[in-house]
Each structure stands twice: as C-alpha cells, then as structure tokens.
Amino acid sequence: MTPIAPGPDSPKGDWREWAKLARAELDWAVVSESIVQNLQRWIVPDDYLTVLVFLPMSHEVNLVPLMEGDPTTRFVATRTPDRGELTVHELGGPLEVHRFGFLQPHSSATQATPDEIDIALLPGLAFDLFGTRLGRGAGYFDRLLSSTRQDAKRVGVVPADLVVDRLPADIHDIPVEYLATEEGVIETA
C-alpha cells in the first residue's frame, strides 16, 4: 500500500522519506519493462544521437534493455567521483562498482562532454507534473544539466506512482521537459 504523500508545503526531506517508502512497494521489473518500451517508441534511433542514461541503483528503472535494443545510438553515463562533479563517459566498456554500491563506467572509459548530450534520461526519487525532480540531495545532476545544451531534452524516468502534483523546488533545481512512465512519455506542464 502506497504511503500518503506529504502536503505541498512539506520540506524535501519529508518527500524523500515518502518516496523511499513508496518505491519499496513497486514491482521494478514490470515498471522498468513498460518504461523502456515507451522510451523505445519515443527515442528515434539516430547515428548521431547521444543519450545520457543511468545505471540503476536498487529501486530505480533498469534502462539496460533500452541500450541493448538500439545499436545506432551513442549511450553515455555519469561517473561519480569521490570528490568533485559528475563526469560523462561512453558505455560499452568495463564498469566498476562505486563505493556506494552502484555501477558506473570504469575510469578508463572515454570521456564525453555534457554539451554532446542530446537526450538526458534522469533518475529521481519522484517528479512533479511541472518537471521538478526530487533527487537524493547532493545536486550532482542539477550541476551537470547546467552544462548541457539548451536544446538537449531532459526526461525524468519515473514510475507513475511517483509523479505528484507539486514538489518543493529550489532556485538551482533544473526541471525536466518530459516524464517517462509506464503510461508513456509526456510533456511536463
């Protein structure tokens, strides 16, 4: 049973606690399969398209089948340093486990620049209908997105149960223009 969401004026910490409880209730294999199918229909394969994906942590959408089903698109992922900002690296080579337990490109992977990204598929604990992303609180993705091109499409990848009417937002939060859920890929308000 999905927990009751906090009120619209609740702080981000309350929303993070709600999202973590709600995420534990989901069937991630089913949700991931539906979202990947919707993204496969939405992303038109292109020899020159660079798509930023994320390698899933527990309770996140698994985008690996999206990459396996599209041999023409260049897929890149972030690498989280022990200190400093996220970097972007090509996928297809070896991966390594970050100290927090998630997979990331190996340090030897070819580095890409944020301005090469055409579509950024972004994780989040929850999103709202206006494109506000509730992350884990470190601000890594907001800083990375500030370096992408203006025409790069930003897509929140999230189960429909974790899309709410309104989340609290800070001035540095960069919203997404699209949400990819099991129900389809939609534009935000």
Image (tube, grey):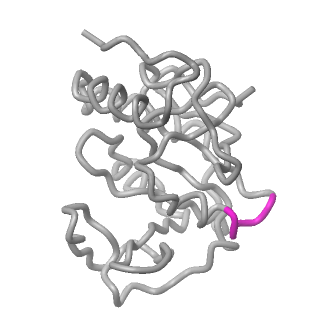
Determine the residue positioned at 66% across, 43% down: 176
Compared to residue 17, the image places residue 134 above or below, namely below
Pick the residue in front: 19 or 12: 12
Q: Position of residue 147 (x, y in %)?
A: 69, 70
Task: Residue 149: say if magenta.
Answer: yes
Tell me: 95 left or right of 185.
Answer: left
Q: Quadrant of the N terminus?
A: top left
Q: Quadrant of the C terminus?
A: top right
Spot the residue most to the right.
150
Q: How many marks?
A: 0
Where residue 172 sits, quadrant-wise, is: bottom right
Residue 50 covered by magenta stretch: no
Q: Quadrant of residue 96?
A: bottom left
Nearer to me, 109 or 171: 171
Q: What segment carries the magenta color? A: 146-150
The answer to whether 153 appears left or right of 53 in the picture is: right
Residue at left offset 55%, top offset 63%: 73
Residue reaching furthest to the bottom: 108
Q: Position of residue 68 (x, y in %)?
A: 37, 55
Instruction: Determine the image quadrant of residue 131.
Output: top right
64 or 168, nearer to the observer: 168
Could you say where residue 117 lies in the image, as x and y percent from the top left?
64, 66
Q: Is residue 139 above or below residue 8?
A: below
For this view, does 65 lie left or right of residue 179?
Answer: left
* Residue at the image point whose x is 44% and y is 51% from the top: 137
Type of secondary structure dominating the magenta stretch? loop
Residue for point 60% across, 65% down: 143
